[in-house]
Image (tube, helix red, strand yellow):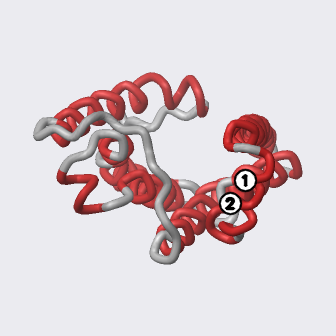
């Protein structure tokens, strides 16, 4: 559990610098340069993500049960997950979805985390999904008081929403049918 918690804290911590210390972030970028900042940020993100994933796998081998969700919650989780992949795609495809939600990636993370909290009752699950949910809420609130970084996106198009929805639903189907079992070790579909 220790490796998992260290990885989770480092991953969410590096992604929280803009939330809790935006001035320090800007000063550091100015001092070491944007390229060095991005490189350091990427290395820490990848290492902490790897540590988090590896530690989560270890924690699942010796689970600590906090609650047992009813079976129907798994079905609710599958339903709640339907918009998640399209929302992730919409973050990079400017259209009405992105204009309406402003931060579709954060909405996707919140829905993903909440959906998984409903279906999983182990301590590691609560820490993982609860941590990401709390981070996404804090990040969204912080956008009200800070400038939003430029995100490389596709050019605006009247078809971007349709592309985000179709490609997102295809990605969801592929992930649910094959990749969730491969990467997470759990087959989420009831059939």
Q: Residue at x 59, y 64 (%)?
A: 135
Q: CA distance from mark 2 to mark 1?
A: 6 Å
Residue sitting at the far right: 2
Front residue of 151/50: it is 151
- Disc 2 vs disc 1: Cβ atoms closer than 8 Å? yes
The vertical placement of 52 against 175, above or below, is: below
Q: Residue 137, how many percent across, how many down? A: 51, 69
Q: Dot 1 corresponds to which residue?
A: 30
Local crowd at mark 1 within 10 Å, few (<14), some, or many (≥20)? few
Do we see residue 178 in this rendering? yes
Locate residue 59: give its quadrant: top right
The vertical placement of 5 against 146, above or below, is: above
Q: Residue 86, how many percent across, how many down? A: 30, 42
Secondary structure at numbered mark 1: helix
Q: Residue at x 53, y 63 (%)?
A: 136
Horizontal side of 110 relative to 82 (left or right) equals right
Locate residue 51: give its quadrant: top right
The vertical placement of 43 against 119, above or below, is: above
Q: Residue at x 31, y 34 (%)?
A: 154
Q: Dot 2 corresponds to which residue?
A: 26
Local crowd at mark 2 within 10 Å, few (<14), some, or many (≥20)? some
Q: How many marks?
A: 2
């Amino acid at each position: 559990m220790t490796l998992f918690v260290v990885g989770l804290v480092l991953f969410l911590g590096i992604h929280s610098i803009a939330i809790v210390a935006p001035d320090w972030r800007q000063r550091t970028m100015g001092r070491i340069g944007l390229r060095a900042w991005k490189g350091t940020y990427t290395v820490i993100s990848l290492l902490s993500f790897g540590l988090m994933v590896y530690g989560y796998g270890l924690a699942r081998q010796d689970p600590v049960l906090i609650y047992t969700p009813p079976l129907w919650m798994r079905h609710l989780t599958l339903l709640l997950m339907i918009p998640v992949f399209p929302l992730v795609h919409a973050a990079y495809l400017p259209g009405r979805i992105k204009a309406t939600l402003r931060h579709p990636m954060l909405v996707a993370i919140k829905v993903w985390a909440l959906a998984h909290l409903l279906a999983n009752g182990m301590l590691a699950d609560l820490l993982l999904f609860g941590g990401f949910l709390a981070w996404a809420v804090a990040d969204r609130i912080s956008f009200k008081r800070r400038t939003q970084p430029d995100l490389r996106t596709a050019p605006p198009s009247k078809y971007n929403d349709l592309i985000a929805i179709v490609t997102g639903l295809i990605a969801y189907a592929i992930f649910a049918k094959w990749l969730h079992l491969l990467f997470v070790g759990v087959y989420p579909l009831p059939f």
